[in-house]
């Protein structure tokens, strides 16, 4: 095995390339698995909607049947109830400043509450069907709502009067979202498979998109140039500036998607579905980076603006609250990133290290000083036995096997293993016993085992500890040999089954081909036999006539 080129500091140990198992510990998976300690709460009915306040302390409101409650984000407990309604509640939302809450109900009305005090501020009526979604306009004095009466309405909150009614939908309207980049534009989607883009200054839609399935939920990207909508089992991303061009069609759920949300940073899309799963998509390649399974179909979902709480509502009346433990100093670390850098500090000296050079830049490469490990220094000094002892003390099999490879390459494996007593031979034997049947390292461990047996076979019986280790190695090798023998038998049986199936398939194919040939031949033979029979009958008739003519 070739090693790195030597330098004045020495030469580092070349790490071998070994097969790697697929790891689930990606940074994304670690981050989303940090939402731990799921708290399951039983509510009186299906949890139809969950919504966080965008202003601190980011409390959240929950709709469950006729009950609507505000929960404290830190304690995960209800701090106040907005009352018990006569009809089930369907949706709730906070105003941007967190001072008002609007609730849509099955009684065709919208209830507006003060988020910090008891009592209802206003009851707005005018829909002729249940109110499925409500959103506050960025101006804070208007309210947008959609209903199963196939309409979208704009309300003046101070007076409770309807300013605009939009009637382009042909079926129940299920979702409504405001464009964060423009206070005049918002989008609605419904069971007519259509997404409409609206401008408050015009009664007609500015864009119409055929989603291809009933639209349950949608979100608008922060730039206002695209929307992501869930309809059926598919999540589709549409380009608004491109006239409704389809950018992505993602089909990772088995059942209908019921809720679509952005995370607190607007860099991840979360979808909840009736298949019990919440899936997380990154917004660059639109790949699923994490998935969470829940015990029941999911109806609603929300994540806090600071990405610390994930709340999921389910159909059987259960609400799950997952909390992410924020590492100590994370807030301070974020603040330090925005602080000014002063000359003479470490951060000032290392600034710009992550900057990538452009094509016109001239890059000067500086070889950093090589920091050698203890065993690498011993290896460079030809202290092979000490280097082997040092890597055995690390208990890292990759480093140990790399050292064994290097010693074998230098023809120094025997010199590194010989001349040991019971205390120095024991760690090497333990390593061989632990990894002699490892698929990743067995090739090189077997070579080391052969060297140990050749050198120390004559002294077996002088140390009880070493004899016990040799006995364990013998038992492990016997078990491995038995396993390999059984695997060979199984392989033979599988080959026999595969061969027999191939023979049966070949016989069946030949039999079917033979039948087709016989059928084809049978038609020709039949036609020929009929003709021959007719000719025979005709000849016989002639002969009979002749005989009759001779008689008289």
Image: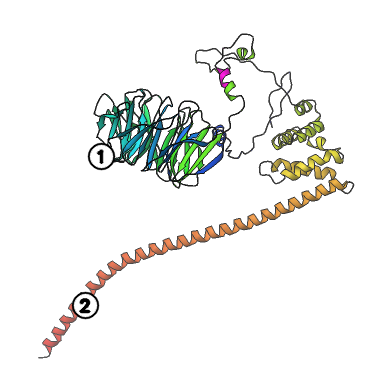
Q: Which mark is residue 330?
A: none
* Residue at (66% x, 44% y) in the render: 439
Farthest residue in the left direction?
552
Farthest residue in the bottom direction?
552
Task: Answer above or below: position of 392 versus 141.
Answer: below
Magenta range: 333-341
Task: Answer above or below: position of 200 versus 49.
Answer: above
Q: Quadrant of residue 17?
A: top right
Residue 546 pos. (x, y %): 14, 84
Q: Nearer the viewer, mark 2 or mark 1?
A: 1
Question: 10 Å neighbourhood of mark 1: few (<14), some, or many (≥20)?
Answer: some
* Residue at (53% x, 57% y) in the render: 498
The one nearer the camera, 412 or 334, is 334
Residue matched to label 2? 536
Residue matched to label 1? 170
Which corner quadrant holds the N terminus? top right
Residue 353 pos. (x, y %): 58, 17
* Local secondary structure at mark 2: helix
Which corner quadrant holds the C terminus? bottom left
The one nearer the camera, 73 or 530, is 73
Question: 10 Å neighbourhood of mark 2: few (<14), some, or many (≥20)?
Answer: few
CA distance for labels 2 and 1: 80 Å
Q: Is residue 24 visible?
A: yes
Task: Answer above or below: position of 47 versus 344.
Answer: below
Q: Is residue 287 visible?
A: no
* Residue 158 on the magenta segment: no
Task: Answer above or below: position of 333 versus 24.
Answer: above
Residue 174 pos. (x, y %): 34, 38
Lateral position of residue 334 relative to residue 473, left or right? left
């Amino acid at each position: 095995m070739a090693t790195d080129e030597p330098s004045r500091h020495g030469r580092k140990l070349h790490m071998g390339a070994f097969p790697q198992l697929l790891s689930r510990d990606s940074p994304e998976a670690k981050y989303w698995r940090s939402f731990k300690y799921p708290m399951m709460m039983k509510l009186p009915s299906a949890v139809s909607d969950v919504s966080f306040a965008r202003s601190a302390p980011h409390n959240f409101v929950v709709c469950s049947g006729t009950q609507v409650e505000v929960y404290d984000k830190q304690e995960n407990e209800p701090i106040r109830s907005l009352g018990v309604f006569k009809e089930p509640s369907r949706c709730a939302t906070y105003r941007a400043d967190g001072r008002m809450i609007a609730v849509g109900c099955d009684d065709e009305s919208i209830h507006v509450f003060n988020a910090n005090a008891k009592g209802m501020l206003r009851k707005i009526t005018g829909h002729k069907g249940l109110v499925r979604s409500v959103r506050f306009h960025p101006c804070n004095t208007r309210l947008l709502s959609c209903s199963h009466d196939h309409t979208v309405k704009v309300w003046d909150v101070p007076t409770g009067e309807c300013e605009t009614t939009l009637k382009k939908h042909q079926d129940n309207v299920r979702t409504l979202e405001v464009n964060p980049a423009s206070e005049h534009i918002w989008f609605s989607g419904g069971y007519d498979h259509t997404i409409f883009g609206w401008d408050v200054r015009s009664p007609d839609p500015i864009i119409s998109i055929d989603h291809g399935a009933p639209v349950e939920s949608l979100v608008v990207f922060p730039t206002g140039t695209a929307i992501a909508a869930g309809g059926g089992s598919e999540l589709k991303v549409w380009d608004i500036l491109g006239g409704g061009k389809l950018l992505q069609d993602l089909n990772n759920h088995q059942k209908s998607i019921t809720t679509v949300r952005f995370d607190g940073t607007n860099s991840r899309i979360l979808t909840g579905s009736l298949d019990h799963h919440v899936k997380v998509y990154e917004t660059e390649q639109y790949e699923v980076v994490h998935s969470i399974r829940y015990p029941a179909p999911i109806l609603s979902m929300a994540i806090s603006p600071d990405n610390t709480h994930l709340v999921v509502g389910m159909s059987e009346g259960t609400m799950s609250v997952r909390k992410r433990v924020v590492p100590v100093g994370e807030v301070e670390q974020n603040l330090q990133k925005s602080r000014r850098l002063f000359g003479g500090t470490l951060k000032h000296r290392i600034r710009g290290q992550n900057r990538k050079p452009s094509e016109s830049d001239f890059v000067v490469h500086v070889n950093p000083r090589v920091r050698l490990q203890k065993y690498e220094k011993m290896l460079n000094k030809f202290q092979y036995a000490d280097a082997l002892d040092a890597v055995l003390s690390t208990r890292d099999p990759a480093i140990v096997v790399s050292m064994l490879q290097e010693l074998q390459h230098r023809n120094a494996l025997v010199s590194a293993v010989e001349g040991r007593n019971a205390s120095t031979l024991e760690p090497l034997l333990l390593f061989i016993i632990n990894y002699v049947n490892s698929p990743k390292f067995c090739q090189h461990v077997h070579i080391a085992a052969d060297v140990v047996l050749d050198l120390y076979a004559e002294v077996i019986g002088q140390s009880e500890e070493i004899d016990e280790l040799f006995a364990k190695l013998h038992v492990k090798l016997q078990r491995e040999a038995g396993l390999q023998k059984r695997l060979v038998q199984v392989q033979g049986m599988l080959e026999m089954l595969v061969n027999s199936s191939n023979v049966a398939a070949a016989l069946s194919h030949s039999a079917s081909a033979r039948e087709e040939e016989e059928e084809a031949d049978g038609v020709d033979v039949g036609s020929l036999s009929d003709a021959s029979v007719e000719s025979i009958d005709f000849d016989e008739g002639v002969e009979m006539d002749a005989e009759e003519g001779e008689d008289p």
